[in-house]
Image: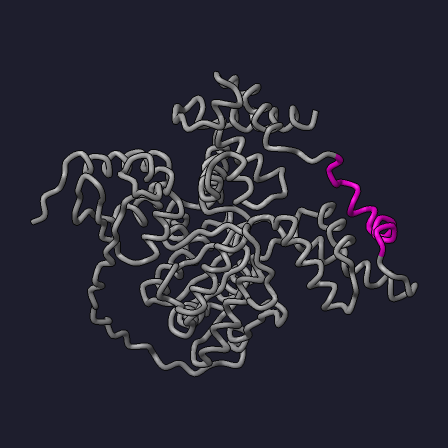
Amino acid sequence: MVMLVSDTHEAWLQFLEYVKERCSAAAFRNWLSPISITEATESEITLEVPNIFVKEYLISNYKNELCSFLPLTHEGEPALNFIIATPVNKAPVPVAAPVVEKAPQEKRFYEVSLNQNYRFETFIEGPNNQFVKSAAVGVATRPGQSYNPLFIHGGVGLGKTHLLHSIGHYIHDKNKKMRVHCITTEAFVNDLVESLKNKSIDRMKRFYRSEVDVLLVDDIQFLQNRLNFEEELCNLFEALRNQNKQVVITSDKPPSQLKLSERMIARMEWGLVAHVGIPELETRVAIIQHKAQQKGLEISNQVAFFIAEHIYNNVRQLEGAINRLSAHCRLLELDITEDLVKKTLREMLQHAPTEKISVEQILKSVATIFQVKGGVRALKGNERKKEIALPRQVAMYLANKLINESLQMLGASFGKTHSTIIHACRNIEKKSVDDEMLRRQISMVERDIYA
């Protein structure tokens, strides 16, 4: 038995208590509870984790908190060693699958509708989507062995479906024997209704549980307020995961913000939840140039930057802008200039901001609305009192929302890391769902900024 140094061991327990109050019960149970201390000294702690993904989750999401509670190295990093636990091999339970003749109408289950243009090679990577793409590649490389399920969420037109189909293509190309099934939530519900109507629900269940190796489900938000269908899909996810079959889900919101049962939310948070952010300026320029090249258009860097500075909500808008320019230029045989872009895309450019918002502006407005003692200086500091920590996270959340910069650049503006920005955004998104006062304060800050 290894003797533990009480102070260091106590610091780890305090860290766990601190985090437990600030994350969902499912996240704590799935990611932090399995971690155990094997050794602790005055200068470092050795932790045993079930797999490498738990280690990555801990460092990615709680590095700042770890630095506050635990000993540090000379480089200022948390002094942690990790041991990967040896997996216990369990003998699979044999299941006798009944032999059923496939009826002609069953072919609809086997139709894999993957968009040929949606592949990893055509996905433009930037700081705001680097993590989620890496997670998607990890799942595609080792389906059923990592991040299961993988839950991808983000706004409209940011690349969720692109990544979903990319996973399907990669797995299908590398392993022809694996059966990949991609379906929208709406299509799944329609299939379920039809099966209930035709009294063929057992056949549908048998297909999904026995004949699918990788299930890709798009737009899970359409399952909200459909409790009967939710239960069936929840049971399906659990059955597939127990067989080490890969599940990937996309949504416009994180699991905690969906109007679904706690059981369903817990299943979706079981693996990895990854956010697709709005691409920052340089990534938008790269997307414009890539889309233009596909259309055979020549766009100068100056024009590409002009478009990227004025169309920033999502990739779909950028693609629509290029399609419109392409049609206009080919019909009238004109070169693409900034004046032409202003005339052709005037409807799409009319909502572009007239002034660039700065982090300093946001901090001043937050300090005013939240009546922060110490003002901007306190928000930029490291004090963890609730009356300062919450407004600081609101400022980070609004900076990420209103400023088109990379997470690294935003983090530097606050004197923090990009992972701190991510943590702050997740926390404010979660709190604002049920806290009406917080939503009003955030709205007041936004009005103050634009005023």
What is the x, y in percent for residue 68?
Answer: 33, 34
Q: Is residue 352 magenta?
A: yes
Q: Is residue 343 above or below residue 12?
A: below
What is the x, y in percent for residue 136?
Answer: 47, 62
What is the x, y in percent for residue 445?
Answer: 60, 26
Q: Residue at x 71, y 50 (%)?
A: 308
Quadrant where the C terminus is found in the figure: top right
Q: Residue at x 46, y 41 (%)?
A: 417
What is the x, y in percent for residue 287?
Answer: 67, 58
Q: Residue at x 66, y 58 (%)?
A: 286
Task: Name the side, left or right, on which 246 lies relative to 46.
Answer: right
Tell me which secondary structure the magenta stretch mostly adopts: helix
Q: Residue at x 22, y 63 (%)?
A: 87
Q: Which residues are magenta?
A: 337-354
Q: Is residue 4 magenta?
A: no
Q: Name the residue nearer the viewer: 151 or 380.
A: 380
Q: How is the image coloured?
A: one colour
Q: Is residue 184 visible?
A: yes
Q: Name the residue nearer the viewer: 227 or 38.
A: 38
